[in-house]
Image: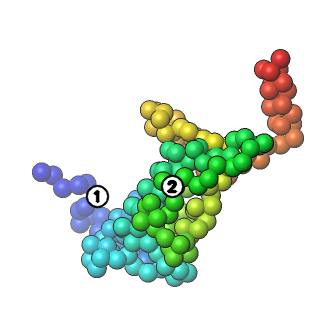
């Protein structure tokens, strides 16, 4: 069996450089390298290395956060407030922190979910608020059933950074309104 192409003595210097950057600030390396070094730290001592600015989730918490994100993406629409004249639906039990092995004590923990906004550092509290606004607000979103991965990622890239709150120019809003009126007629 051949060894992976990146794991050779030729790349030792670059790996050392990335590791030094990661120790200084994980945001200075790509999300894949962050995951690699986090896994290394976890394997070495069973926890992740604590970062300045707050507690950081270890590998187990990272998988729990990833599960939390996945559930919002797949069933968050069940908690969306779609009827402006009716009551907002109650919280869905599968979207609770406890359902994913997380708790209110974890809300100030800094997480770096590789599959959300490029792995940027964010507190669990802010992540939860963003997911709630993106998937459970006045607009419900259900797209995980789409088989084409590229299409799903395109939708995520358009919805998640702005929490599904588009910022249209006045001319764009008028054009959308006209098209809606035309479709209604």
- Above or below residue 182? Residue 75 is below
- Above or below residue 174? Residue 60 is below
**Location of residue 177 (image quadrant):** top right
The alpha-carbon separation of the residues under discs 1 and 2 comes to 43 Å
Please tell me which residue is depicted at 54% across the width and 67% down the height of the picture.
124
Please tell me which residue is depicted at 47% across the width and 35% down the height of the picture.
145
Which residue occupies the foreground of this view, 112 or 28?
112
Residue 4: x percent and y percent? 23, 55
Please tell me which residue is depicted at 36% across the width and 67% down the height of the picture.
60
Label annotation for residue 72: none
- Sequence-first tag of 1 and 2: 1
Which residue occupies the foreground of this view, 154 or 27?
154
- Above or below residue 120? Residue 19 is below
Left or right: where 99 falls relative to 9 = right
Q: How is the image coloured?
A: rainbow
- Above or below residue 80? Residue 38 is below
Which residue occupies the foreground of this view, 32 or 86?
86
Q: For numbered disc 1, what is the local secondary structure? A: loop
Left or right: where 21 falls relative to 166 = left
Circle 2: is it few (<14), some (14-19), or many (20+) Cα within 10 Å?
A: few
Residue 21: x percent and y percent? 45, 74
Q: Residue lying farthest top?
A: 185
Question: Does the image show residue 109?
Answer: no
Residue 55: x percent and y percent? 49, 79
Label annotation for residue 6: 1
**Residue bearing the label numbered 2:** 93
Left or right: where 4 falls relative to 151 = left
Question: Does the image show residue 64?
Answer: yes
């Amino acid at each position: 069996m051949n060894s992976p192409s990146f794991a050779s003595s030729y790349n030792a210097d670059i790996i050392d450089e990335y590791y030094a950057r990661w120790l200084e600030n994980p945001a200075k390396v790509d999300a894949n390298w962050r995951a690699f070094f986090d896994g290394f730290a976890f394997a070495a001592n069973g926890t992740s290395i604590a970062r300045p600015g707050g507690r950081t989730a270890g590998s187990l918490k990272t998988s729990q956060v990833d599960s939390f994100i996945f559930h919002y993406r797949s069933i968050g629409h069940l908690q969306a407030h779609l009827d402006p004249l009716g009551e907002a639906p109650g919280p869905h039990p599968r979207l609770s922190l406890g359902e994913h092995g997380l708790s209110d004590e974890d809300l100030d923990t800094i997480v770096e979910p590789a599959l959300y906004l490029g792995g940027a550092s964010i507190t669990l509290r802010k992540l939860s608020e963003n997911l709630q606004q993106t998937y459970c607000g006045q607009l419900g979103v259900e797209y995980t059933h789409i088989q084409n991965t590229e299409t799903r990622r395109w939708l995520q890239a358009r919805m998640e950074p702005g929490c599904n709150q588009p910022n249209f120019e006045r001319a764009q809003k008028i054009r959308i309104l006209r098209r809606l009126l035309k479709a209604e007629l």
